[in-house]
Image (cartoon, rainbow, N blue to C red):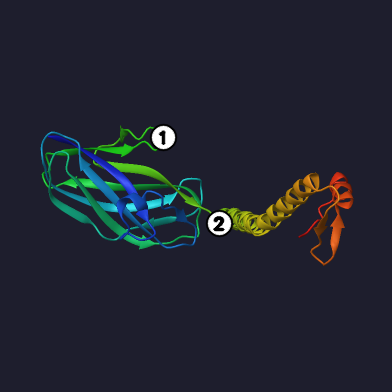
Amino acid sequence: MEHKLQIEFIHSKNRLLPKFLRRYSQIIQTKPFDIGLRLKNTGNVPIQGITIKNIQWRSADGKDMLSWVDNSFHFDTLNPREEKEIWADKMGTYVHGLCTISLLVISDNPEDTIQTYQIDPFTKRPSPCRDKNNWVDFFFIRSKSEYEQTLTNRLLVIYTAIGLGIAMATLYYIKIQTEPIFNTKEKNQADAQEYCRSNPTGKWPKASGGYFTCDEVFRILGAGTTSLQK
């Protein structure tokens, strides 16, 4: 019998993180990371007994690098539509760029074969692997320098946003502090003008002591001066 098994490569800086957070995790050169697999029986019958072994990964762009997982993993039963995760190993590497990962899937029943599927990274649809009982997929390791440059750029954006926020808050504070002063000046000028219209020969008190004549009040306001203070 031929079974259908979908396998997805998973990774995380910390395997204890919730699944939705692990989706945003990236593999960074020289940074330790956990690698694992998500298995799903996409067939219509249970898979009775399979072993995952010979997990290994290497550079896909010609770099001399090969790493493997010593452990093998056995599942007694995987029911239709059932999904399980295994965390294979914790590791790190000096290599960066495109990498390939592969493994063998062996059924406990020698008469059964396993058709494996990988997840297409662009369409997110399952794609059958060429060889039965074998699985292969690709993943990407970001270079340390690229990661650090991206981090620096993000910090600059954050600092700029913080600086802009402080500047806007300062301007608002100055506005609310000075607005009553301007309002007081405007009211004082309006009061002086209204008073002198009713009392052309009258006098308007100065803030420093003494008085303005109403002729002086009209002359000052006509020149656009704001020096009238009661």
Secondary element type, mark 1: loop
Residue 174 in percent (x, y) is at 67, 58
Q: Residue at x 54, y 58 (%)?
A: 144
Question: Where on the picture, by quarter, is residue 39?
Answer: top left
Closer to the camera in the image, 116 or 31: 31
Closer to the camera in the image, 59 or 25: 25
Tell whether 39 sits left or right of 30.
left
Question: Where on the picture, by quarter, is residue 73?
Answer: bottom left
Q: Earlier in the sequence, mark 2 or mark 1?
A: 1
Q: Residue at x 64, y 59 (%)?
A: 170
Check the image and report above or below for 177 versus 23.
below
Q: Residue at x 33, y 38 (%)?
A: 119
- Few, some or many residues within 10 Å of mark 1 (<14, 14–19, 20+): few
Tell whether 56 sits left or right of 202.
left
**Amino acid at the residue labelled 2:** Leu
Q: Which mark is drawn over residue 52?
A: none
- Few, some or many residues within 10 Å of mark 2 (<14, 14–19, 20+): few
Tell whether 61 sits left or right of 191.
left
Secondary element type, mark 2: helix
Q: Residue at x 16, y 34 (%)?
A: 43
Check the image and report above or below for 110 versus 92.
above
- Residue under label 1, please give it: 122
Residue 75 in percent (x, y) is at 15, 51
Closer to the camera in the image, 82 or 154: 154
**Amino acid at the residue labelled 1:** Phe
- Residue under label 2, please give it: 151
Q: CA distance from mark 2 to mark 1?
A: 25 Å
In the picture, the quarter occupied by the N terminus is top left
